[in-house]
Image: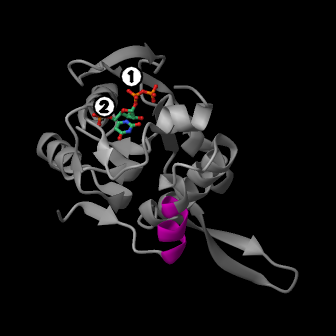
Amino acid sequence: MSNVFASTHPLVAHKITRMRDQYTLSKKFRELVREVAALMAYEATADLQVATRTVQTPLEQTQGYELKEPIGLIPILRAGLGMVEGIWELMPSAEVWHIGLYRDERTLKPVAYYNKLPIAPTVSVCLILDPMLATGGSAIATVDILKEWGVNKIKFVGILAAPEGIAALQAAHPDVPIHIAAIDNHLNEHGYIVPGLGDAGDRQFGTG
Ligand code: PRP
Ligand code: URA
């Protein structure tokens, strides 16, 4: 599990508990997704490369830093959408490239339905955003797409993971770090994370 980073931050623990609560309504749930995503991105980007930059303060010239690598935020539709805003506020120059996948309810395999990536990669670091890492199928398919695109520095940033999903993503792509707010107990027979928070897409968008 060396490439797996589960948050130990009290703010994250507090907020995901509110997300799990079945009585938390969509508006609050969306707020929490946005806030937890920002906290997770802060942790996941601790090793981004910087270049030095000279800056003139009102008092004197000093040396500072700026981000060096173009960053891509890759939300997996739909549920990953809610994670974009909070992270984008922290890194407004990031590009956002959506990947549309849904999980077939019967086979639990991901089905691709949206991908408008240009032919050549325009970023060098990609943060895949999806609140739920269940079987891992959607995350693995997205890493496959990004590697095929030509990006090799890829991180998965999520909120809840099942051990099964972590194992599958690590087996398929051991080079991809997994930053997750919490690791839950298991998947149930329908592929839902237990104890989990239910359907992250439905809870954000008021569907289902
Ligand atoms: C959910 C979730 C992930 C996927 C995780 O999406 O947001 O994308 O399932 O499951 P996996 O790890 O087993 O692939 P879903 O397919 O429900 O689509 P939605 O976001 O449009 O609701
Ligand atoms: N997708 C969800 O939204 N929730 C789960 O528990 C598993 C997959």
Residue holding disc 2: 138
Residue 3 visible at all: yes
Residue to which mark 1 is pinned: 101
Tell me where the magenta segment starts and ends, as one range: 10-17
Q: Is residue 48 left or right of residue 107?
A: right
Q: Secondary structure at mark 2?
A: helix
Residue type highlighted by circle 1: Leu
* Residue found at the very far bottom of the displayed protein: 59
Is 73 or 58 nearer to us in this picture?
73
Foreground of the two, 56 or 3: 3
The quadrant where ligand 1 appears is: top left
Quarter of the image where one finds residue 183: bottom left
Magenta segment, prevailing SS (helix, strand or loop)? helix
Examine the rendered structure and indicate whether residue 85 appears above or below residue 179. Answer: above
Residue 26 at what x, y percent from top left?
Answer: 64, 41
Q: Residues within 10 Å of mark 2 (few under 14, many from 20)?
A: many
